[in-house]
Image (spheres, grey):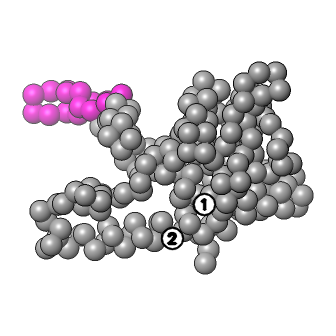
Amino acid sequence: MWARLQESCHRRASRYETKVFSKYGWEVRKAMSKTTRCMQLTRAADYAVRVMIHLAALPEHERVSLPALALASEAPASFLSKVLQILAHAELIESRRGTSGGFVICEKGRKATLRTVIEAIEGPICLNTCLTTGRSCPRKGWCPAHPVWREAQAAMVTVLERQTVNQLAGIEQLTDGAAGTMKLGMTGPVLTLLTTP
């Protein structure tokens, strides 16, 4: 999964070109934009979190169609269907075909933390290859950056394990009543509550 993410970032970066004047004249060099240089969740993980919060906020056992979920999460239906398949395979949601079919959140999905949802889509969270289980970086023993990577990853994992999908769905409902309709996603009050101790 991580290799595909890196490949996708490199492909996006190759689309951005800048003209640079060298001693031989104008030259086109490829440059990464600011959006491709930052560390961020993939769209798939973000959509997964949006969908899980939306499903948890609904009455128990209520099934929702793919088009309705795509509308609620502001995600393309064709892309979202792949995300939903992964969530169903991880047993966080159930899917049923047919006229009375749709998607419903499982009890395991309600109790899942943000880390669980993200890792269902992305695989294990890992800021650097030296932190991957089973891999050994020859620099690990003396590299001054290794403890920093380890601490940063531990902090991120701690934050992502603080809130369950059910808790976030409750926050979403409270926000709806106080300030009108809130867009689904990792912005605004939800993110603030996640990052404060």
Residue sitting farthest toward the right: 177
Q: Is residue 171 toward the left or the right of residue 34 in the image?
A: right
Residue occupying image coordinates x 36% and y 44%: 2
Instruction: From this view, report whether residue 194 is shown above or below residue 52.
Output: below
Residue occupying image coordinates x 84% and y 62%: 174
Identify the secondary structure beneath mark 1.
loop
* Towards the viewer: 97 or 176: 97
Identify the secondary structure beneath mark 2.
helix
* Towards the viewer: 19 or 192: 192
Q: Which residue is mark 1?
A: 113
**Quadrant position of residue 125:** bottom left
User: Magenta residues: mostly which secondary structure?
Assistant: strand
**Quadrant position of residue 192:** bottom right
Residue occupying image coordinates x 72% and y 24%: 97
- Write the start and end of the magenta stretch as one range: 14-30
Q: Which mark is residue 79?
A: none
Q: Residues within 10 Å of mark 2 (few under 14, many from 20)?
A: few
Q: Amino acid at mark 2?
A: Thr
Residue occupying image coordinates x 69% and y 34%: 95
Q: x and y percent of residue 156 in the render?
A: 47, 66
Q: Nearer the viewer, mark 2 or mark 1?
A: 1
Q: Residues within 10 Å of mark 1 (few under 14, many from 20)?
A: many
Q: Which residue is mark 2?
A: 158
Q: x and y percent of residue 53 in the render?
A: 71, 51
Q: x and y percent of residue 179 in the render?
A: 86, 57
Residue sitting farthest toward the top: 99
Which callout, 2 or 1, points at the residue further toward the start of the chain? 1
In which quadrant is the N terminus drawn? top left
Q: x and y percent of residue 82 in the render?
A: 56, 30
